[in-house]
Image: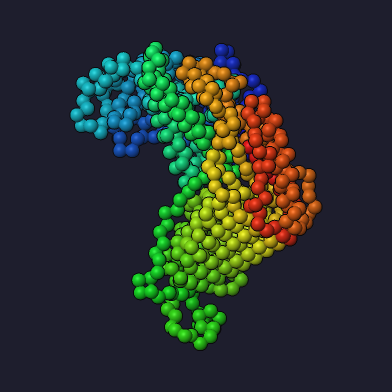
Amino acid sequence: MAEGLLAGGGLGSEAMAPEPELPGWATDEGLERLEKGLFENEDSCSDCSDRAKPGSSLQSFVPEGKTHFPEMFQTSQLLFYERFRAYQDYILADCKASEVKEFTAEFLEKVLEPSGWRAVWQTNVFEVLVEVTDVDFAALKAVVRLADPYLCESQVSAFTLECMKELLDLKEYRLPLQELWVVFDDSGLFDQTALAIEHVRFFYQNIWRSWDEEEEDEYDYFVRCVEPRLRLHYDILEDRVPSGLIVDYQNLLTQCEESYRKFLNLRSSLSNCNSDSEQENISMVEGLKLYSEIEQLKQKLKLIENPLLRYVFGYQKNSNIQAKGIRPNGRKITHVVSSTMMTGLLQSLLRDRLCPEPCKEEIEIQFHSDPLSAINACYEGDTVIVCPGHYVVRGAFSIADSIELEGYGLPDDIVIEKKGKGDTFVDCTGADIKISSMKFVQHDAVEGILIIHRGKTTLENCVLQCETTGVTVRTSAEFLMKNSDLYGAKGAGIEIYPGSKCTLSDNGIHHCKEGILIKDFLDEHYDIPKISMVNNVIHNNEGYGVVLVKPTIFSDLQEDAQDETEENKALKVQTSGEADVAERVDLEELIQCATGKMELYARAELSEQVEGNCEIVNELVAASTQKGQMKKKRLSELGITQADDNLMSQEMFVSIVGNQFKWNGKGSFGTFLF
């Protein structure tokens, strides 16, 4: 999994390849290699003699607006591979979750200066300069005293020197290492100290979860938790995760932390209660509900953290775009977009589009120099005509009313190119939107080139040059695509969500990661999508031509695997701290089924041209059946049964006629089943 993530981050495996053996910190040679590894950077060509030169290899910074404070080491801007190597090779290695603190303390003992350095103690209320006199490695705390002269900045004016001394006295002058920022020293003596503290700080702020220690310990904690969470953190920083999914993840984290805190309090009260009172029985039932809720929340968090599952599963997103409705005066306007309007062009427009026949009534026309301003000026029933030209827009097209957006000419003559970052390029929520005869070129749109949130959108005679995902058809939306060409998506060309309706006719979908990805939700049930595919050519995609995602994790398994006895055992596991893996649903094992051990299945290569509904449906059914048998065998090892072997419903394919599937990397059809 590590190699895949590294490649996904744009780095080759050689750039982050681990050492042949784990570092031997007990020897001088191991410590020397540890120091070299911590300071290695991607472009470094330095030899050992360079490393021996005096001076710091780290940058410094002064906190904004705090001119009286000394400079501090700048360590917060480390790259993904730098943190990856530090945690994998030097700090956590192959430790279990219960050993994280022990491994971290051992690492710090080898690289941290035990005394003689200054740091800024930062909290949400104040910042104060301290001197470190000793380090309690086992507790991950530093023993400090106030620096001379006393430097402190506080949001509370009444926070005096006496108050600070009293606070430190209450803390016994022992502060968590992650709250300390090492003062810059250009001698290079404290570089390791600053970096080591940064790794500890980052880990406990972004990676560690309070419930990790109670997870199953037979699994490598780095591979199971650290790597996917680290990758997600940097995917978010680098704008590779949709904003809606980020909000979902943060909300899930908050909910899980609150539920886990309640569970700990309840477990503590139960452990102190020896009577079989009615109140205790009520608490047991409440604890059981909390346990189930926490497991579901953790499952959803793992789904988002894992890059593969994050890609194949859908998530809920509501668009806040508000429709304007009918213009107050009741009129409909035709908006004409042209960077320059010449008399010849105007005459052609009047002849072909504006007055093709004697007008029964006058048409009101507004002229615009760019398509974005024209769309923003639209009301219900308006028409936008885009004249030939290359238009560069820096915002998103948010179409909330039923309008027509049409190009006047061939698609390659009307090019609309997006610049600047954002989730999407074109957002559609109108009841009946029509887009025709133009080319869209996408850049830096995290979620895709076109999203239909709700209502019906018709795309005809268009070209979509994608960069991330192509078209996303969300739940309850309807999409009709005709005579169009879509290519270049790093994700799927078209993502179809459950509960939607998608009609594809006479299109080309090619050179994407997958041609069409039919998504599903992890534990929420919606109607199956309704899909029609007629005379499309799906070719030269990296993966499959069509991929069907059909999970049965958790929601279906709960019904089969959890009865009253199992629930009581599960609560007993949590209240006593003893694990009984053979007698309960192991959610982590299921995640492994989904990510590593249950690979996508595709049958042998089909003929290059497949025509007719029967052949496609039969192929998908065969793939689903065989995949279901493999999954059933795997789950049987965990004591879990699966009732339904037919995980793919033929009902979703309304009409499939005359399609061609050519030169797709993994085959024409694949299924991803849990």
Report which quarter residue 283 is drawn in: top left
Residue at the (53%, 85%) spot, across then down? 357
Q: Is residue 387 left or right of residue 626?
A: left
Q: Is residue 443 visible?
A: no
Q: Is residue 164 left or right of residue 399?
A: left
Counting every numbered tag in the picture gives 0
Q: Is residue 288 visible?
A: yes
Q: Position of residue 635 (x, y in %)?
A: 65, 30
Front residue of 72 and 637: 637
Residue at the (44%, 42%) spot, across then down? 247
Q: Give the farthest residue toward the bottom.
A: 358
Q: Position of residue 480 (x, y in %)?
A: 59, 62
Q: Position of residue 239 (x, y in %)?
A: 50, 45
Residue at the (43%, 25%) spot, across then down? 285
Residue 18 to residue 43: above or below? above
Front residue of 476 and 319: 476
Residue at the (74%, 44%) spot, across then down? 622
Image quadrant in which the C terminus is located: top right
Q: Is residue 140 left or right of residue 436?
A: left
Q: Position of residue 195 (x, y in %)?
A: 47, 26
Image quadrant in which the N terminus is located: top right
Residue 128 to residue 422: above or below? above
Front residue of 614 and 325: 614
